[in-house]
Image (cartoon, grey):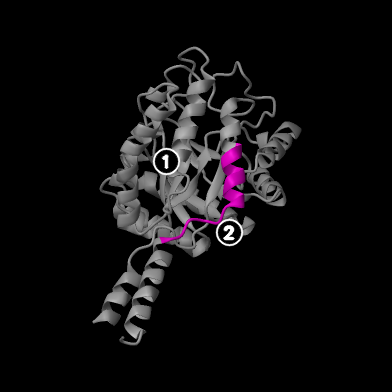
Amino acid sequence: MFAAALALALALPSTARAAASFRGFTFPSWWKDAYDGAGAQKSLQDLAATGADSVAVIPTWYMENGESAAIAPTDQTASDASVAAVIRRAKSLGLRVVLKPHVNCRDGRPTPLIRPRDARAWFSSYRAFLLHYARLAAAERVDLLVVGTELFSMVPGRRADWEAMIGAARSVYGGPLTYAANWYDFYLVPFWDALDYVGVDGYFPMLGGADERALENGWNAYKPLLLAEARARGKPLLFTEVGIASQKGANRKPWDYRDFGPVDAATQTAYFAAFLKVFGREPAFAGFLQWCWDLDPAAGGPDDKSMTVQGKPALAVLEEYFRASRAAPPPPSRRAEAERAAARALAVLRAPLP
């Protein structure tokens, strides 16, 4: 009976298995040779100098509009040669690389709201897009491939379509996979079991402004929902994006990258400080990729309102976390805790009777 209980304990899902963690930044490109410039190369060196251990390389393909079925590269798409080159540069700097290809609409339609007229044709086109980058990921031995980002309208009721594409990607690329769900729909994704991480673009709105304690309360309100999903799937939780503009009121709409208020670096700083206090030592937490590190090394600064942390107080918060994460041993996994508990129980059973 005890052996059966021990086997059950050791079989329980562990959301913090030996999966790699990713602590770093997204590094998106919106032009065919933008990764190749001297500025982008200097910016990548600056990124590595923060102590981050990871970078997400993001090329983008496009639909003509939200009803189109075809997905294709344009001059705004980073060329394969430039993507391969930036991956190699990142690896030479000691960074793990996430390949996170995006799909956008040329007419400005938000990606979560696309409604292709021919869904079957769209999935066929998307499959070609995904396999294109799966082959590149395999050739360059990237550390994680993201199979989709914020495709809310194309997920519910489409489990079979996604699982087929994920299977095809695995036949090409042998590394781990995730999907980047949006903050409001991660619990609706029906194919987490086919992936290696529960990935969430964590633009969670909350009250508090620059009040770190209030923002901690906000993150703590979302935390049980996120951990419940990760634990139910037996997967680590990875924030495939997390970010906020340095503007007053950004805490209420962290996804908004536009100019909507006065500069407020304190809100950006407090948002990240609260986030890391709530999740930083959680065993199920597999890290985060901050949106975003700009290809321009001169980006950011005290008067900048964008989502970058370059030249802003929030960067010091992230750097401190990177340093501490490299110095500290990883938190114990739930499997390790179960093994220790089982060992203690066996020791009690084997002890001689008084």
Residue 188, horizontal then vertical, whole percent: 28, 45
Q: Amino acid at mark 2?
A: Ala
Question: Mark 2 — residue?
Answer: 138
In this view of the protein, which residue sits in the foreground, 174 or 354? 354
Residue 206, horizontal then vertical, whole percent: 35, 27
Q: Report the side of 193 relative to 17 (left or right).
A: left
Range of magenta residues = 319-333
Q: Quadrant of the N terminus?
A: bottom left
Q: Quadrant of residue 39?
A: top right
Residue 17, horizontal then vertical, whole percent: 45, 62
Residue at x 34%, y 79% (from the top left corner): 348
Q: Quadrant of residue 203?
A: top left
In this view of the protein, which residue sits in the foreground, 145 or 229? 229
The crowding category of the residue bearing disc 2, from other C-alpha atoms within 10 Å (few below 14, some 14 to 19, many at least 20), is some
Q: Report the side of 267 relative to 322 (left or right).
A: left
Secondary structure of residue under mark 2? helix
Residue 332, horizontal then vertical, whole percent: 46, 60
Q: Does residue 297 belong to the magenta stretch?
A: no
Kindly give the residue lying farthest to the right in the view shown. Answer: 38
Which of pointers 2 and 1 lies earlier in the amino acid sequence? 2
Classified by dominant secondary structure, the portion drawn in magenta counts as helix
Secondary structure of residue under mark 1? helix
Question: Mark 1 — residue?
Answer: 278
Q: Amino acid at mark 1?
A: Val
